Amino acid sequence: MTFYDAFTGMPRYNFVHTLDSRGNPDTIPVDPLGKYNLVVHTTPEVEKKDIELTAGTHNYIAVDAAQGSLLLQMNGFNEYQKLQAIVRKSGEMKTLYAHAFDEEKKYLVGKYDLEILTLPRILLPGVNIAQSNVTKIMIPQPGVAAIGMGIKGYGTIFVEKGDFLEKVTDLNVNSVRESIVLQPGSYKLVFRPLNARLSIYTKEISFTITSGQTTQVKF
């Protein structure tokens, strides 16, 4: 937590809060002169303004900062490199934290929107964090698409959602082979050779990704 001078805006004290040997909130010494703004560095942060202290006595500063924990895990081997999820307060766009998989982290109680940076991304709105509980989120193990084009070109992978195609990622235009980690589902690869000057040379192929398996995709 940080105590700021309410008049100048300058930080006066930094403390890491703890409980004493009896399990009570720790007592900390601060100058009673002036007013303070307090920022508690939880996730998200909590602020309390215009705190006035009385000299020579214990002053109690109440801050509503109940917390629970979030744990993200993969149901099987994680093929991704440093997989993370963007955590936001529910209904807001500001990023609070980039939460790594297998990391257990505390958040204020409430609802959060998660955007897991898989391919395609997994959106989990309204995840509830309850006080003193661990909310565990388990996602399916991905598979791998081993793609062989045989020639350089422009390629894009789409995930099939009913009759709608949602773009997932572009292929490397300078490569003829790629291995791409994808979540289980049905996909379509659309490809046009680099030197082809007519759109009619566009090719497409559908394929399915299964958890823990490699799918060969070749034209």
Image (cartoon, rainbow, N blue to C red):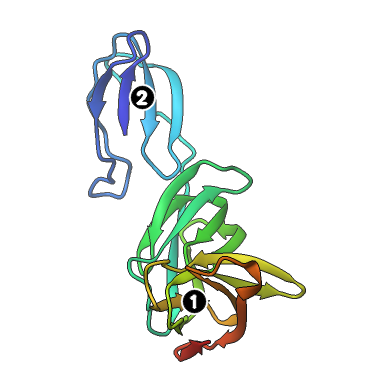
* Relative side of 128 to 148, left or right: right
Q: Nearer the viewer, residue 3 or 51?
A: 3
Q: Residue beneath label 2, please?
A: 59
**First in residue order: circle 1 vs circle 2:** 2
Q: Residue at x 56, y 53 (%)?
A: 112
The answer to whether residue 130 is above or below residue 96 is: below
Residue ranking furthest to the right: 163
The quarter of the rendered structure image containing the N terminus is top left
The answer to whether residue 54 is above or below residue 154 is: above
Residue 14 x/y as whole percent? 24, 30
Residue 82 x/y as whole percent? 33, 66
**Number of numbered callouts drawn:** 2
Q: Residue at x 45, y 45 (%)?
A: 96
Q: Residue beneath label 1, please?
A: 182
Residue 151 x/y as whole percent? 43, 78
* Relative side of 35 to 92, left or right: left
The local crowd at label 2, few if under 14, some if 14 to 19, many if 20 or more residues have their Cα within 10 Å, is few
Residue 24 placement: quadrant: top left
Q: Give the number of the mark in front: 1 or 2.
A: 1
The answer to whether residue 116 is above or below residue 19 is: below
The answer to whether residue 5 is above or below residue 168 is: above
Q: Residue at x 56, y 43 (%)?
A: 93
- Are the residues at dot 1 and dot 2 in contact (C-beta closer than 8 Å)? no
Q: Is residue 217 visible?
A: yes
The residue type indicated by label 2 comes to Asn
Q: Residue at x 29, y 9 (%)?
A: 33
Q: Which mark is residue 51?
A: none
Q: Is residue 187 visible?
A: no
The residue type indicated by label 1 comes to Leu
